[in-house]
Structure formats: structure tokens, C-alpha cells
Amino acid sequence: MANILIVEDDQDINDLIARNLKLVGHTYQQIFDGNDAVKIVSENNFDLILLDIMLPSLNGFEVIKKIPFTPIIFITAKDALEHKLNGLQLGADDYIVKPFEMLELLARIEVVLRRTNKNITTFSLDNVVVNMSDKTVTAEGVSIDLSPREFELLEVLIRNQNIALSRDKLLELAWGYDYAGETRTVDNHIQKLRSKLGWEERIKTIYKLGYRLEVKQ
């Protein structure tokens, strides 16, 4: 998974982001000051930076000018169009306004990582190996045949591992807002994935909500 730098001076927000990055398998470092961000980026390689604008010492717009190219998502309370345009013109890959939904942030992180080829390409759990690039699944070297819908749902579960997702959210993330099926479709595909992958104990049912792919940390 990716190595991500969190630059956010609000301790609670910084910690919240860090906990969720850990849940889905990313590594991270936490920074609370603009000058410190510039320094740590000069000494380490990161796949992505989550960058606040209103920071001590140097604001986010100043920070982005001082660091070598690294994919960046601005996360800020500044919602004016001029600020968003400024951030994107400075080279940011995305711009998210606070308050935000954590699942949306995780989804946008995955989009940027895929676009910059910094994201996970294979995922292994128990005896199953999932290749995201060529959309193949094997168990102990034997190919497992998944339908396109099953693979899309599997990919969403992997990218949101250890996070409980409602049936509606799984429909939205896997098949889009316009998908005409009902939430029962999710249940049917989950049962097929459990059977084909042998993940009866891995894909947990969350009572009155949905499902979670449980991965040991």
C-alpha cells in the first residue's frame, strides 16, 4: 500500500485520518507544521501528501512551492473558488473542503494513487492473490473465475478493508449511483465471493448495516 504524509495542524483531524489510513493498510507519518512538512519531504519519499492550507510557519500554498513533485490532495476549510483554483494551479491533484466524509477522502486517495501509479497492484490474503491491474484472482496458483461485477465488489472491499460499508455504499462504490439493482444484489454477490474465495470468515456481516473485509493488521 501507499506511504502517505498527513500535514494537518488539528490534532483530532490528523489522528482521525491516520486511523483510517491504517485501517485500509496504508502507512503514514503525521506532521502539524508547514516548515516541518518541507523538511520531512526533503528527507523521505512519500506516495501522497494530504495537505492543509492553514498551517503554522508556512501555509499549504507555500509548502507546495517548496517540495519536489509528489501527488498532493489539499484538505482545507477554505471553500472559496479562488482558493480551490489556486491550489489546483499550483499542482495539487485534488482539493477537499472540510468537513468531509472519510469514505470520500479514502476514495479520492485511491483515485490519485491509481492515476499516479502509486497504488496497490496486488493483494494477498490467506491463499488468495488478487491482481488489480489485470483483474485476475488465484488461490494457491489456481485461477478463480469472477464476473466483472464480482471483481468490482471485491476491489471495493479490498480498498476499504477493515471498514464497515453499508449495502448502499457498496452499491455506490462498486457499481455507481445509477446502478439499477437493489441492495439484495450486494448480498447475492457477497455470498458468491465468500464461496469462490473461501472467505466465509473474512467477509463479515455487520448487523443491520452491510459488510466488512476483515484483514489482520
Image (tube, rainbow, N blue to C red):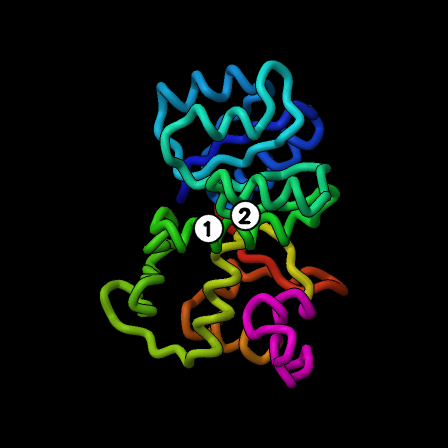
Reply above or below: 217 against 9.
below
The three-letter amino acid code for the residue at tag 2 is Asp
Res 217 seen here: no
Depth check: give the residue in front, 60 or 142.
60
Residue 60, numbered label: none
Q: Is residue 45 left or right of residue 191?
A: left
Q: Secondary structure at mark 2?
A: strand
Residue at numbered disc 2? 94
User: What residue sits 57% from the left and 28% below the top?
Assistant: 60
Rendered position, 101 above or below 90: below
- Which one is nearer the viewer's eye here, 85 or 57? 85
Quarter in which the N terminus is drawn: top left
Where does residue 206 sit, x and y in percent of width and height?
68, 60
Kind of residue indicated by mark 1: Val
Residue 31 relative to residue 147: left or right? right
- Residue 28 within the segment the image draws in magenta: no
Residue 18 against residue 180 in the figure, above or below: above
The image quarter containing residue 170 is bottom right
Measuring 33% from the left and 58% from the top, which residue is drawn there? 127
Residue 217 or residue 163, whichever sits in front: 163
Name the residue located 45 percent from the left edge and 38 percent from the top edge.
48
Q: Which residue is labeled 1 in the image?
A: 112
Indicate the position of residue 73 as horizontal and vertical percent values.
53, 42
Name the residue rendered at 39%, 38% in the picture: 47
Question: Looking at the image, how many numbered discs can be counted on the residues?
Answer: 2
Q: Residues within 10 Å of mark 1 (few under 14, many from 20)?
A: some
Q: Position of residue 10 (x, y in %)?
A: 69, 25
- From the top left corner, tell me how far across and down residue 26 is, in percent: 46, 40
Whether residue 17 is visible, yes or no, is: yes
Q: Are marks 1 and 2 in contact (CB under 8 Å)?
A: yes
**Chain part drawn in magenta:** 167-186
The residues bearing labels 1 and 2 have C-alpha atoms spaced at a distance of 8 Å
